[in-house]
Image: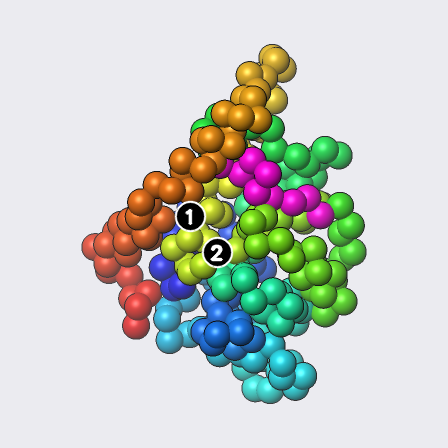
Amino acid sequence: MATSFQWTAHLGLHEAVANHFSLAVNNNGTQFLMNPNQVHFSRIRASDLLLLDADDPDTLNRPGAPDPTTWGLHGAIHRRCPHAHCVMHTHSIFATVLASLADSTLPRIDQNTATFFKRYLVDNHFGGLTFEEEGERCAAALQDPKKKTMIMGNHGVLVFGSDPADAFNRLYYFERAAETYIRAVQTGLRLRVLSDEIAEKTSLELEGFPGQAESHLSEIKDILRTEGSDFDS
């Protein structure tokens, strides 16, 4: 998890101290690790992570409580969506630009955009900051385990996965996919859109590509260690 935080900051996919990742640590997902309140992603170490219980109503009253919007969103998801083991939410630029369009769907125009074919949902009902009511609404929309990416209209993006490698890889490639689409639209030229059949075939092939997410995160760990980061302390 700490690797994901620090590399997200390195890539500029975070927004100040406002974004948040979480990881379930028990079988039903209700106990989870999450970043501490108002700490920059680039400084988060493994020992800084908070251990929270989604079923604890007194969480925000305890010392060292999490950001209430973080708790509202991730607490609700870990309470309602046991399939969402690792959850990552950012306001990365291109994903947020996509989320700001009247039509926030992602056309399948290349390999990266095809990755998400029929595997994301668009939330069109932004209701303000993700305090508990908004968090519960978002969690209710994430019931399909196959749709692991939520384009949060007027807000940003949320992804989930089986572990930090899976979730971070999805976050990274969604931002790349959104950037490709936005830059293609900026040319003003017609888009070359893949057929449903080829988009689905491509997505399935990428899902079955062995060890890609794990290798991605492992390489990042090695880079951070070489740079002298204490992320794993």
* Mark 2: amino acid: Gly
Residue 73, quarter of picture: bottom right
> x, y (%) of residue 2?
38, 64
For mark 1, does the 10 Å Cα neighbourhood hold few (<14), some (14 to 19), or many (20 or more) residues? some
Circle 2 sits on which residue? 161
| Image coloring type | rainbow
Describe residue 34's horizontal placement relative to residue 75 as left or right: left
Identify the image quadrant of the N terminus.
bottom left
Circle 1 sits on which residue? 169
> Is residue 18 depicted above or below 176 in this figure?
below
* Mark 1: amino acid: Asn
> Is residue 187 depicted above or below 141 in this figure?
above
Pointers 1 and 2 in contact (C-beta within 8 Å): yes
Identify the image quadrant of the C terminus.
bottom left
Residue at the outermost top position: 189
Q: CA distance from mark 1 to mark 2?
A: 9 Å
Describe residue 139's horizontal placement relative to residue 124 as left or right: left
**Residue occupying the point 50% across, 25% down:** 198
**Residue occupying the point 71% across, 48% down:** 123
> x, y (%) of residue 228?
24, 60
Stretch of the chain drawn in magenta: 115-123
**Residue occupying the point 23% across, 54% down:** 222
**Residue occupying the point 45% across, 31% down:** 202
Residue 99, quarter of picture: top right
Check if residue 42 falls in the magenta segment: no
Q: Nearer the viewer, mark 1 or mark 2?
A: 2
First in sequence: mark 1 vs mark 2: 2
